[in-house]
Amino acid sequence: MALLEARGLSVNYGGLYANRDIDLDCHTGKLVGLIGPNGAGKTTFIDAITGFTPVSEGKVTFDGVDLAGLSPDKRAKIGLTRTFQSLELFEDLTVRDNLMAGAERAQWHSIITDVLMPGRNERQYREQVDWALDIMRLTDRADTLPSDLSHGQRKLISVARALAAKPKLVLLDEPAAGLDTAESQLLGAHLREFLDHDMSLFLIDHDMGLVLNVCDYIYVLDFGEIIAEGTPAEVRADPAVISAYLGESAGESQASSGATFGGQQQTGDIAGAIDDIIHDVSEETR
Amino acid sequence: MSDWPFYALLGVGTGALYAAFAMSVIITYRGSGVVNFAVGAMAMIPAMVFAELRASGDLVIPIVGLPNRFRLGDPMSFVPAAALGMAVGLIVAAVIYVVVIRSLRSAPPVTMLVATVGLTLVLQALATRGFGNVTLRVSSILPDDVISLGGRPFPVDRLWLLVAVCVLALGVGVVERFTRFGLATRAAFLNEKGAILLGLNPTRIGLTNWLFAAALAGSVGIVGSSLGGVSPFTFSLFVVPALGAALAARLQSISVAVGAAVAIGSFEAIAVHIVAQQQVPRFFLGGISALVPFVVIVGALILVGKRLPNRAAILERAQVPVVLARADARVWALTLAIALIVVVSGDPTVRFAALQTMFVATLLMSIGVLTGLIGQVSLAQLALAGFSAFMLSRFDGPLGFPLAPMAAVAVTIVVGTLVSIPALRVRGVQFAIVTFSLAVVFDELLFRSPTFVGRGGIAQVDAPSIGGFEFGIFDGEQFPARVFGVVMLVVTALCAAVVQGVRRGPLGRRFLAVRSNERAAASAGIDVAQTKVLAAAIASLLAGVAGLMFAYKAMTFNGGGLSAQDGLLVLALGYVGGVGSIAGAVVGGILAPSGLFIVVILGGGSSPDQFLITGIALVLVAMKFPQGIAGSWQMLRSRIESQRQRDGSDPPGHETREAPVVMVETARTVEPGTRSGTSGVSESSGATGWRP
Ligand SMILES: Nc1ncnc2c1ncn2[C@@H]1O[C@H](COP(=O)(O)OP(=O)(O)OP(=O)(O)O)[C@@H](O)[C@H]1O
Ligand SMILES: [Mg+2]
């Protein structure tokens, strides 16, 4: 049985299906990717899995637990954490405290111990936080405020915060967006490292180089539906994917809906980018 | 039962006033993003000027330092008096906009709220100085016939007022929907940057809306002043139902707001009638009508509010900066030593001022937990303290010293926690409005209820004593007794220690995480609702202790000094001192009315002046130093420290940096476009869509 199983998952935003009938598995120790054009419903999928948006139909189980009715914080407590596309850091807390807040798991009695013996509960989490800081190369920034750091470093903090709790599965929403190529490659290298620490990953990104390089298995989403899945090699060769990114149907729908869905206007750029990248990657693999 | 419709109709007059204020609030909010707490006080100025002109013919201008009363001859007739009143009101409004509101456009909503609370205090103080603390009554200018309605006399002026307000509302609706100006306002509200790019001027749009809102509230204030007279404080309390109606309309729909406001007015009249008929237990003889707006507000918020803000709405995310300083044992020791000297000083007035300072400081620590750590601006902490004081007087007889105060605090914690539960769905300014209406409920329903307060409306406590050792405020020789001061100091220090314990530990981190970003907190496994309730419980504990101080300090007391109005002042002191730090609470306590600063440095001083100074300080703090006196000082110190460190002989390559002990204003992150271009619907565009 897979760690995360989504069966027939649909999310309906007032008549519009942002996700429709999605079947998706994440297996322990694997890095699963989800790609798709802007507005395809990728973030919505993460929101639905982590409890930030209600699921209209379908069922999600995580580690054998049915997630229906669990609040986002309960899901985090059973080992399902996420990052946000818009980072959502705790701007009032230092980098270390951002991670500490992510790592700590309060129990009902910690209210008392937190006031009377504040140091006691912290000790066990400090190590985890140090590890996450170290792995993201943030140790020397631990005592600064996020607002004093560069965008790339802020991205790393958001990933580190999701990792600090040593969750079973981390859902990453475009962690490489806005990073330069070197930073993005570094991130890719880190991601594989986490798998060795008993964590599984789920990655959304527009950076095709990153996704095709690091993922074990990839799902492709378009207009809320899974249009293809498979290993990177299979996905790259899939005609449905190519047409979603490059094909004429995308061009047509862009023409008809481009004005309302600003994101779709970028399809052309993506097509160019994916072309270059596929070229790069295939050269690299050779 | 059958006479309810009659009383409902009687209430529409007040309801129409509420409606005008609610519209004014909404227009202001649309125009400049400010929830204007001062709407009532701003309407009071033209109404007072008008009433004074009608009564004595004197033109009174709300300023200090210059002659402010001009004899214009005989009492004036309606039209010139109204015109002059409006002129003064609009000038005041324009000055307020240019000096204060304009620069607050991009401030956190909570800062705006604090600034308008400051404005309320300033305007009230100015009016009290100019007109005196009087209620001016003017004859009705609306047709004041009395008709017979089902055999009862019914004054028709209130119906006319309602008609006038409805016509105004229609006009507002038309302007909003069908004119270029209405469109420009909406554009600037939804996306200020975009509006600028289109060649609109948000500042001017804001000013026009602001003046329009002020004119609307002011004119209805003038016309409505005949219903019950005007005093510097009357309209200020109308803010509660007005804000309630505006909230019910989600600060959007004018028609819903007017409907809700009129309904509130009607239900209040029915409530008053029920009380007058003695159809309710004696307990509620206080002010049952205060419950009506509270119920409407809470109901509206439960319907409208969300447990977690969704990703499109980053409403109210920005927070007032908090200063997180590490505890410095030397500072604590020094402060305690000085406090001890003051508490045992030879001068009884100084000793008494010290007691007041400690009471307020403890109360401010309570506000500090809620506002500083969890980001909820509470205006009800003074009311909770009052509740605790009255509970103490109830328990004092049967339970005696150590048990009675413990029971009082326990009950206060329970009540404070319970009332925080409906407020879980609201944040920022909305929370402030809920707590303000709650403070009004406490004041009018409980603190004035003879059953709750005790015989003759006066509560009493005995001097505390353990094993025959008495340590009350009066020990038979000195007043106030030194021992009492020392005990209060110990209690204050204990409270400070609890707050410090919370702040520096995991709990404080969780609080700040929730304050920074509720969505992220939930994703980090923090139960946001539970954390907020916990903060409310801790804050109630501190407020409860402050209430004990209040009671033991006074021995006999009534609701005086515990009103919602006083609650505004307490919040003001908290902000001036610096919300969210213990030092800030102490500074606020020192600056409190009858506190050490006023008594020792200023040598007393009259009350309106204190309010004036506090109000101005509050506005200034909101505009220039949102972290308060203590916060600014700590910020300065840490800046100097890090400067020194940079200049110092740090070996090159030495990487550890001193932890910044200061939190600067949270930047609202605007995400640069994703690499392949940001979609128009992504979260990042949501962030930029909010007022930059
Ligand atoms: N709260 C909401 N209410 C209504 N519609 C929404 C909401 N959130 C997202 N949508 C819609 O759902 C669709 C999918 O959005 P989503 O953000 O999940 O896409 P995405 O694949 O993450 O895009 P991007 O690559 O730009 O991040 C979009 O059409 C969006 O407009
Ligand atoms: Mg997305």
Image: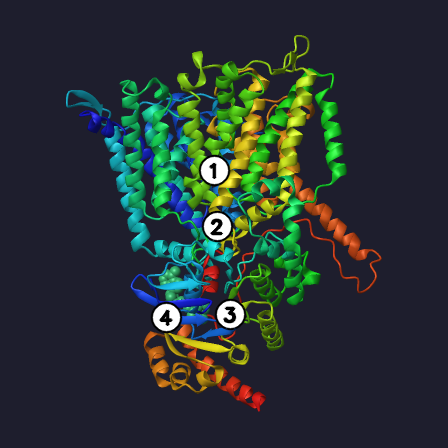
Of badges 1 and 4, the one in the foreground is: 4
In the image, are marks 2 and 4 on the same chain?
no
Of badges 3 and 4, the one in the foreground is: 3
Residue at coordinates 57% horizontally, 56% vertically from top-left? A102
Specify the amino acid type for callout 1. Answer: Val
Residue wearing tag 1: B92
Marks 3/1: CA distance? 67 Å
Q: Secondary structure at mark 3?
A: loop
Specify the amino acid type for callout 3. Answer: Thr
> Which mark, residue A28?
3
Residue wearing tag 4: A22
Q: Earlier in the sequence, mark 2 or mark 1?
A: 1
A234 relative to A75, above or below: below
In the image, are marks 2 and 1 on the same chain?
yes
Residue wearing tag 2: B316
Residue A91 in sight: no
Residue at coordinates 61% horizontally, 57% vertically from top-left? A99
Q: Are marks 2 and 4 in contact (CB under 8 Å)?
A: no
Tag 4 subunit: A
Foreground residue among A123 and B301:
A123
- From the viewer's perspective, tell me whether residue B655 is left or right of residue B225: right
Tag 1 subunit: B
